[in-house]
Image: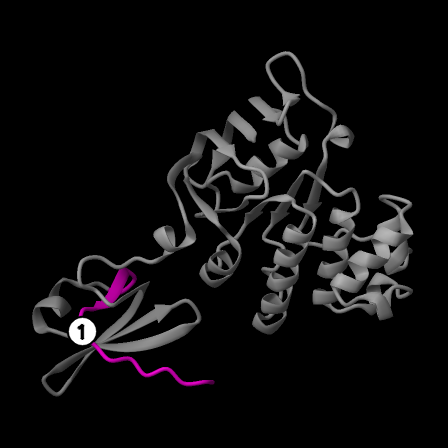
Amino acid sequence: MINIDINKQLHGSDGLMNLNIKIDIKYKEFLVLTGKSGSGKTTFLRILAGLEKSNSNIKVGQELWQNDKYIMPVQKRSIGFVFQDYALFSNMSVLNNLLFVQKDKKLANKLLDLTELTSLKNRLPHNLSGGQKQRVSLCRAMMNKPKLLLMDEPLSALDSNIRLKLQKEILQLHKEFNTTTIMVSHDPSEIYQLANRVIVLELGNIIQDGSAKEILLKTSKSQKFSFEGELLNISKVDETYIAIISIETQLVEVVVSHDEAKVLKVGQKVRVSTKAFHPSISKI
């Protein structure tokens, strides 16, 4: 069990706030942190890693990482950290980036094989694609077989096909090495694919804690589906009102009533839902 009780004052999206998080995390759990920008997610990871000072109590099993009298140095914590920007050594090959962490060629080759990088092991980082660099970064983080793997939106800069492939590889490594993983993500599909527990932060506090389905599936009563988006426009076509709504990367048109059109305003966050329908799903 990992026991975490973190308290730190910081500047959030709405000014000064207290990061106040008290949770227990089970071994081998895959936990995703989500929430608005400035809610404290990255700071939480940095405190766990020992990269940021705070008034915290952190205990991993029987090992004390931090309390009011002691802070374990970063290098002594059994963690792997995967950043958004890869942070690879530009003058070292893929293999040597891994061996810099731990002189264990057998483990390095196993990780490269699991992530399909073996044929690229002698290349320098500048000869790799973004997805390949992120796989190297992930492998490097696993070289110490960390008790805790921390990932700060590692796939946010990649396209959807590469993201999907890396999600599978992240999950494979998580299971293969029996690692406890904490990842920051804003992507609902990514969260659903990876997490067995999701924590939502707002202004430094936990506002939701549950399974991915409990947190992400926003339907109620007899609703069959529900999506959140931003109202971009309402126009009248003959006697019908049409709302254009941005949902993630898609735009949808929805017919609204006269009464709904009167109260809705462009720029509002809205929820689109239905109670009775027969969806048709086809391959794109």
Residue 29 seen from this side: yes
What is the x, y in percent for residue 273? 23, 67
Mark 1: give few (<14), some (14-19) or many (20+) Cα within 10 Å.
few
- Residue 163 position (above or below residue 182): below
What is the x, y in percent for residue 200? 42, 44
Identify the main secondary structure in magenta. loop
Would you identify the image quadrant in which residue 230 lies?
bottom left
The residue that appears at 63% across and 70% down in the rendered structure is 162
The residue that appears at 59% across and 43% down in the rendered structure is 28
- Residue 161 position (above or below residue 124): below
> Residue 269 in magenta?
yes
Residue in the foreground of this view, choosing between 157 and 32 = 32
Which image quarter is the N terminus in? Answer: top right
Query: Which element type, helix, strand or loop, lies under badge 1?
Result: loop
> Residue 77 in magenta?
no
Q: Name the side, left or right, on which 17 lies relative to 176.
A: left
The residue that appears at 86% across and 70% down in the rendered structure is 119
Residue in the foreground of this view, choosing between 150 and 261 = 150
Q: Name the side, left or right, on which 248 lies relative to 164.
A: left
Amino acid type for the residue under numbered disc 1: Ala
What is the x, y in percent for residue 262? 11, 66
| Residue annotated with mark 1 | 276
Q: Name the side, left or right, on which 204 lies relative to 49.
A: left
Would you identify the image quadrant in which residue 66 lies?
top right
Residue in the foreground of this view, choosing between 125 and 215 = 215
For the record, the magenta segment spans: 266-284
Q: Residue furthest bottom?
A: 238
Residue 157 seen from this side: no
Q: Residue furthest top?
A: 69
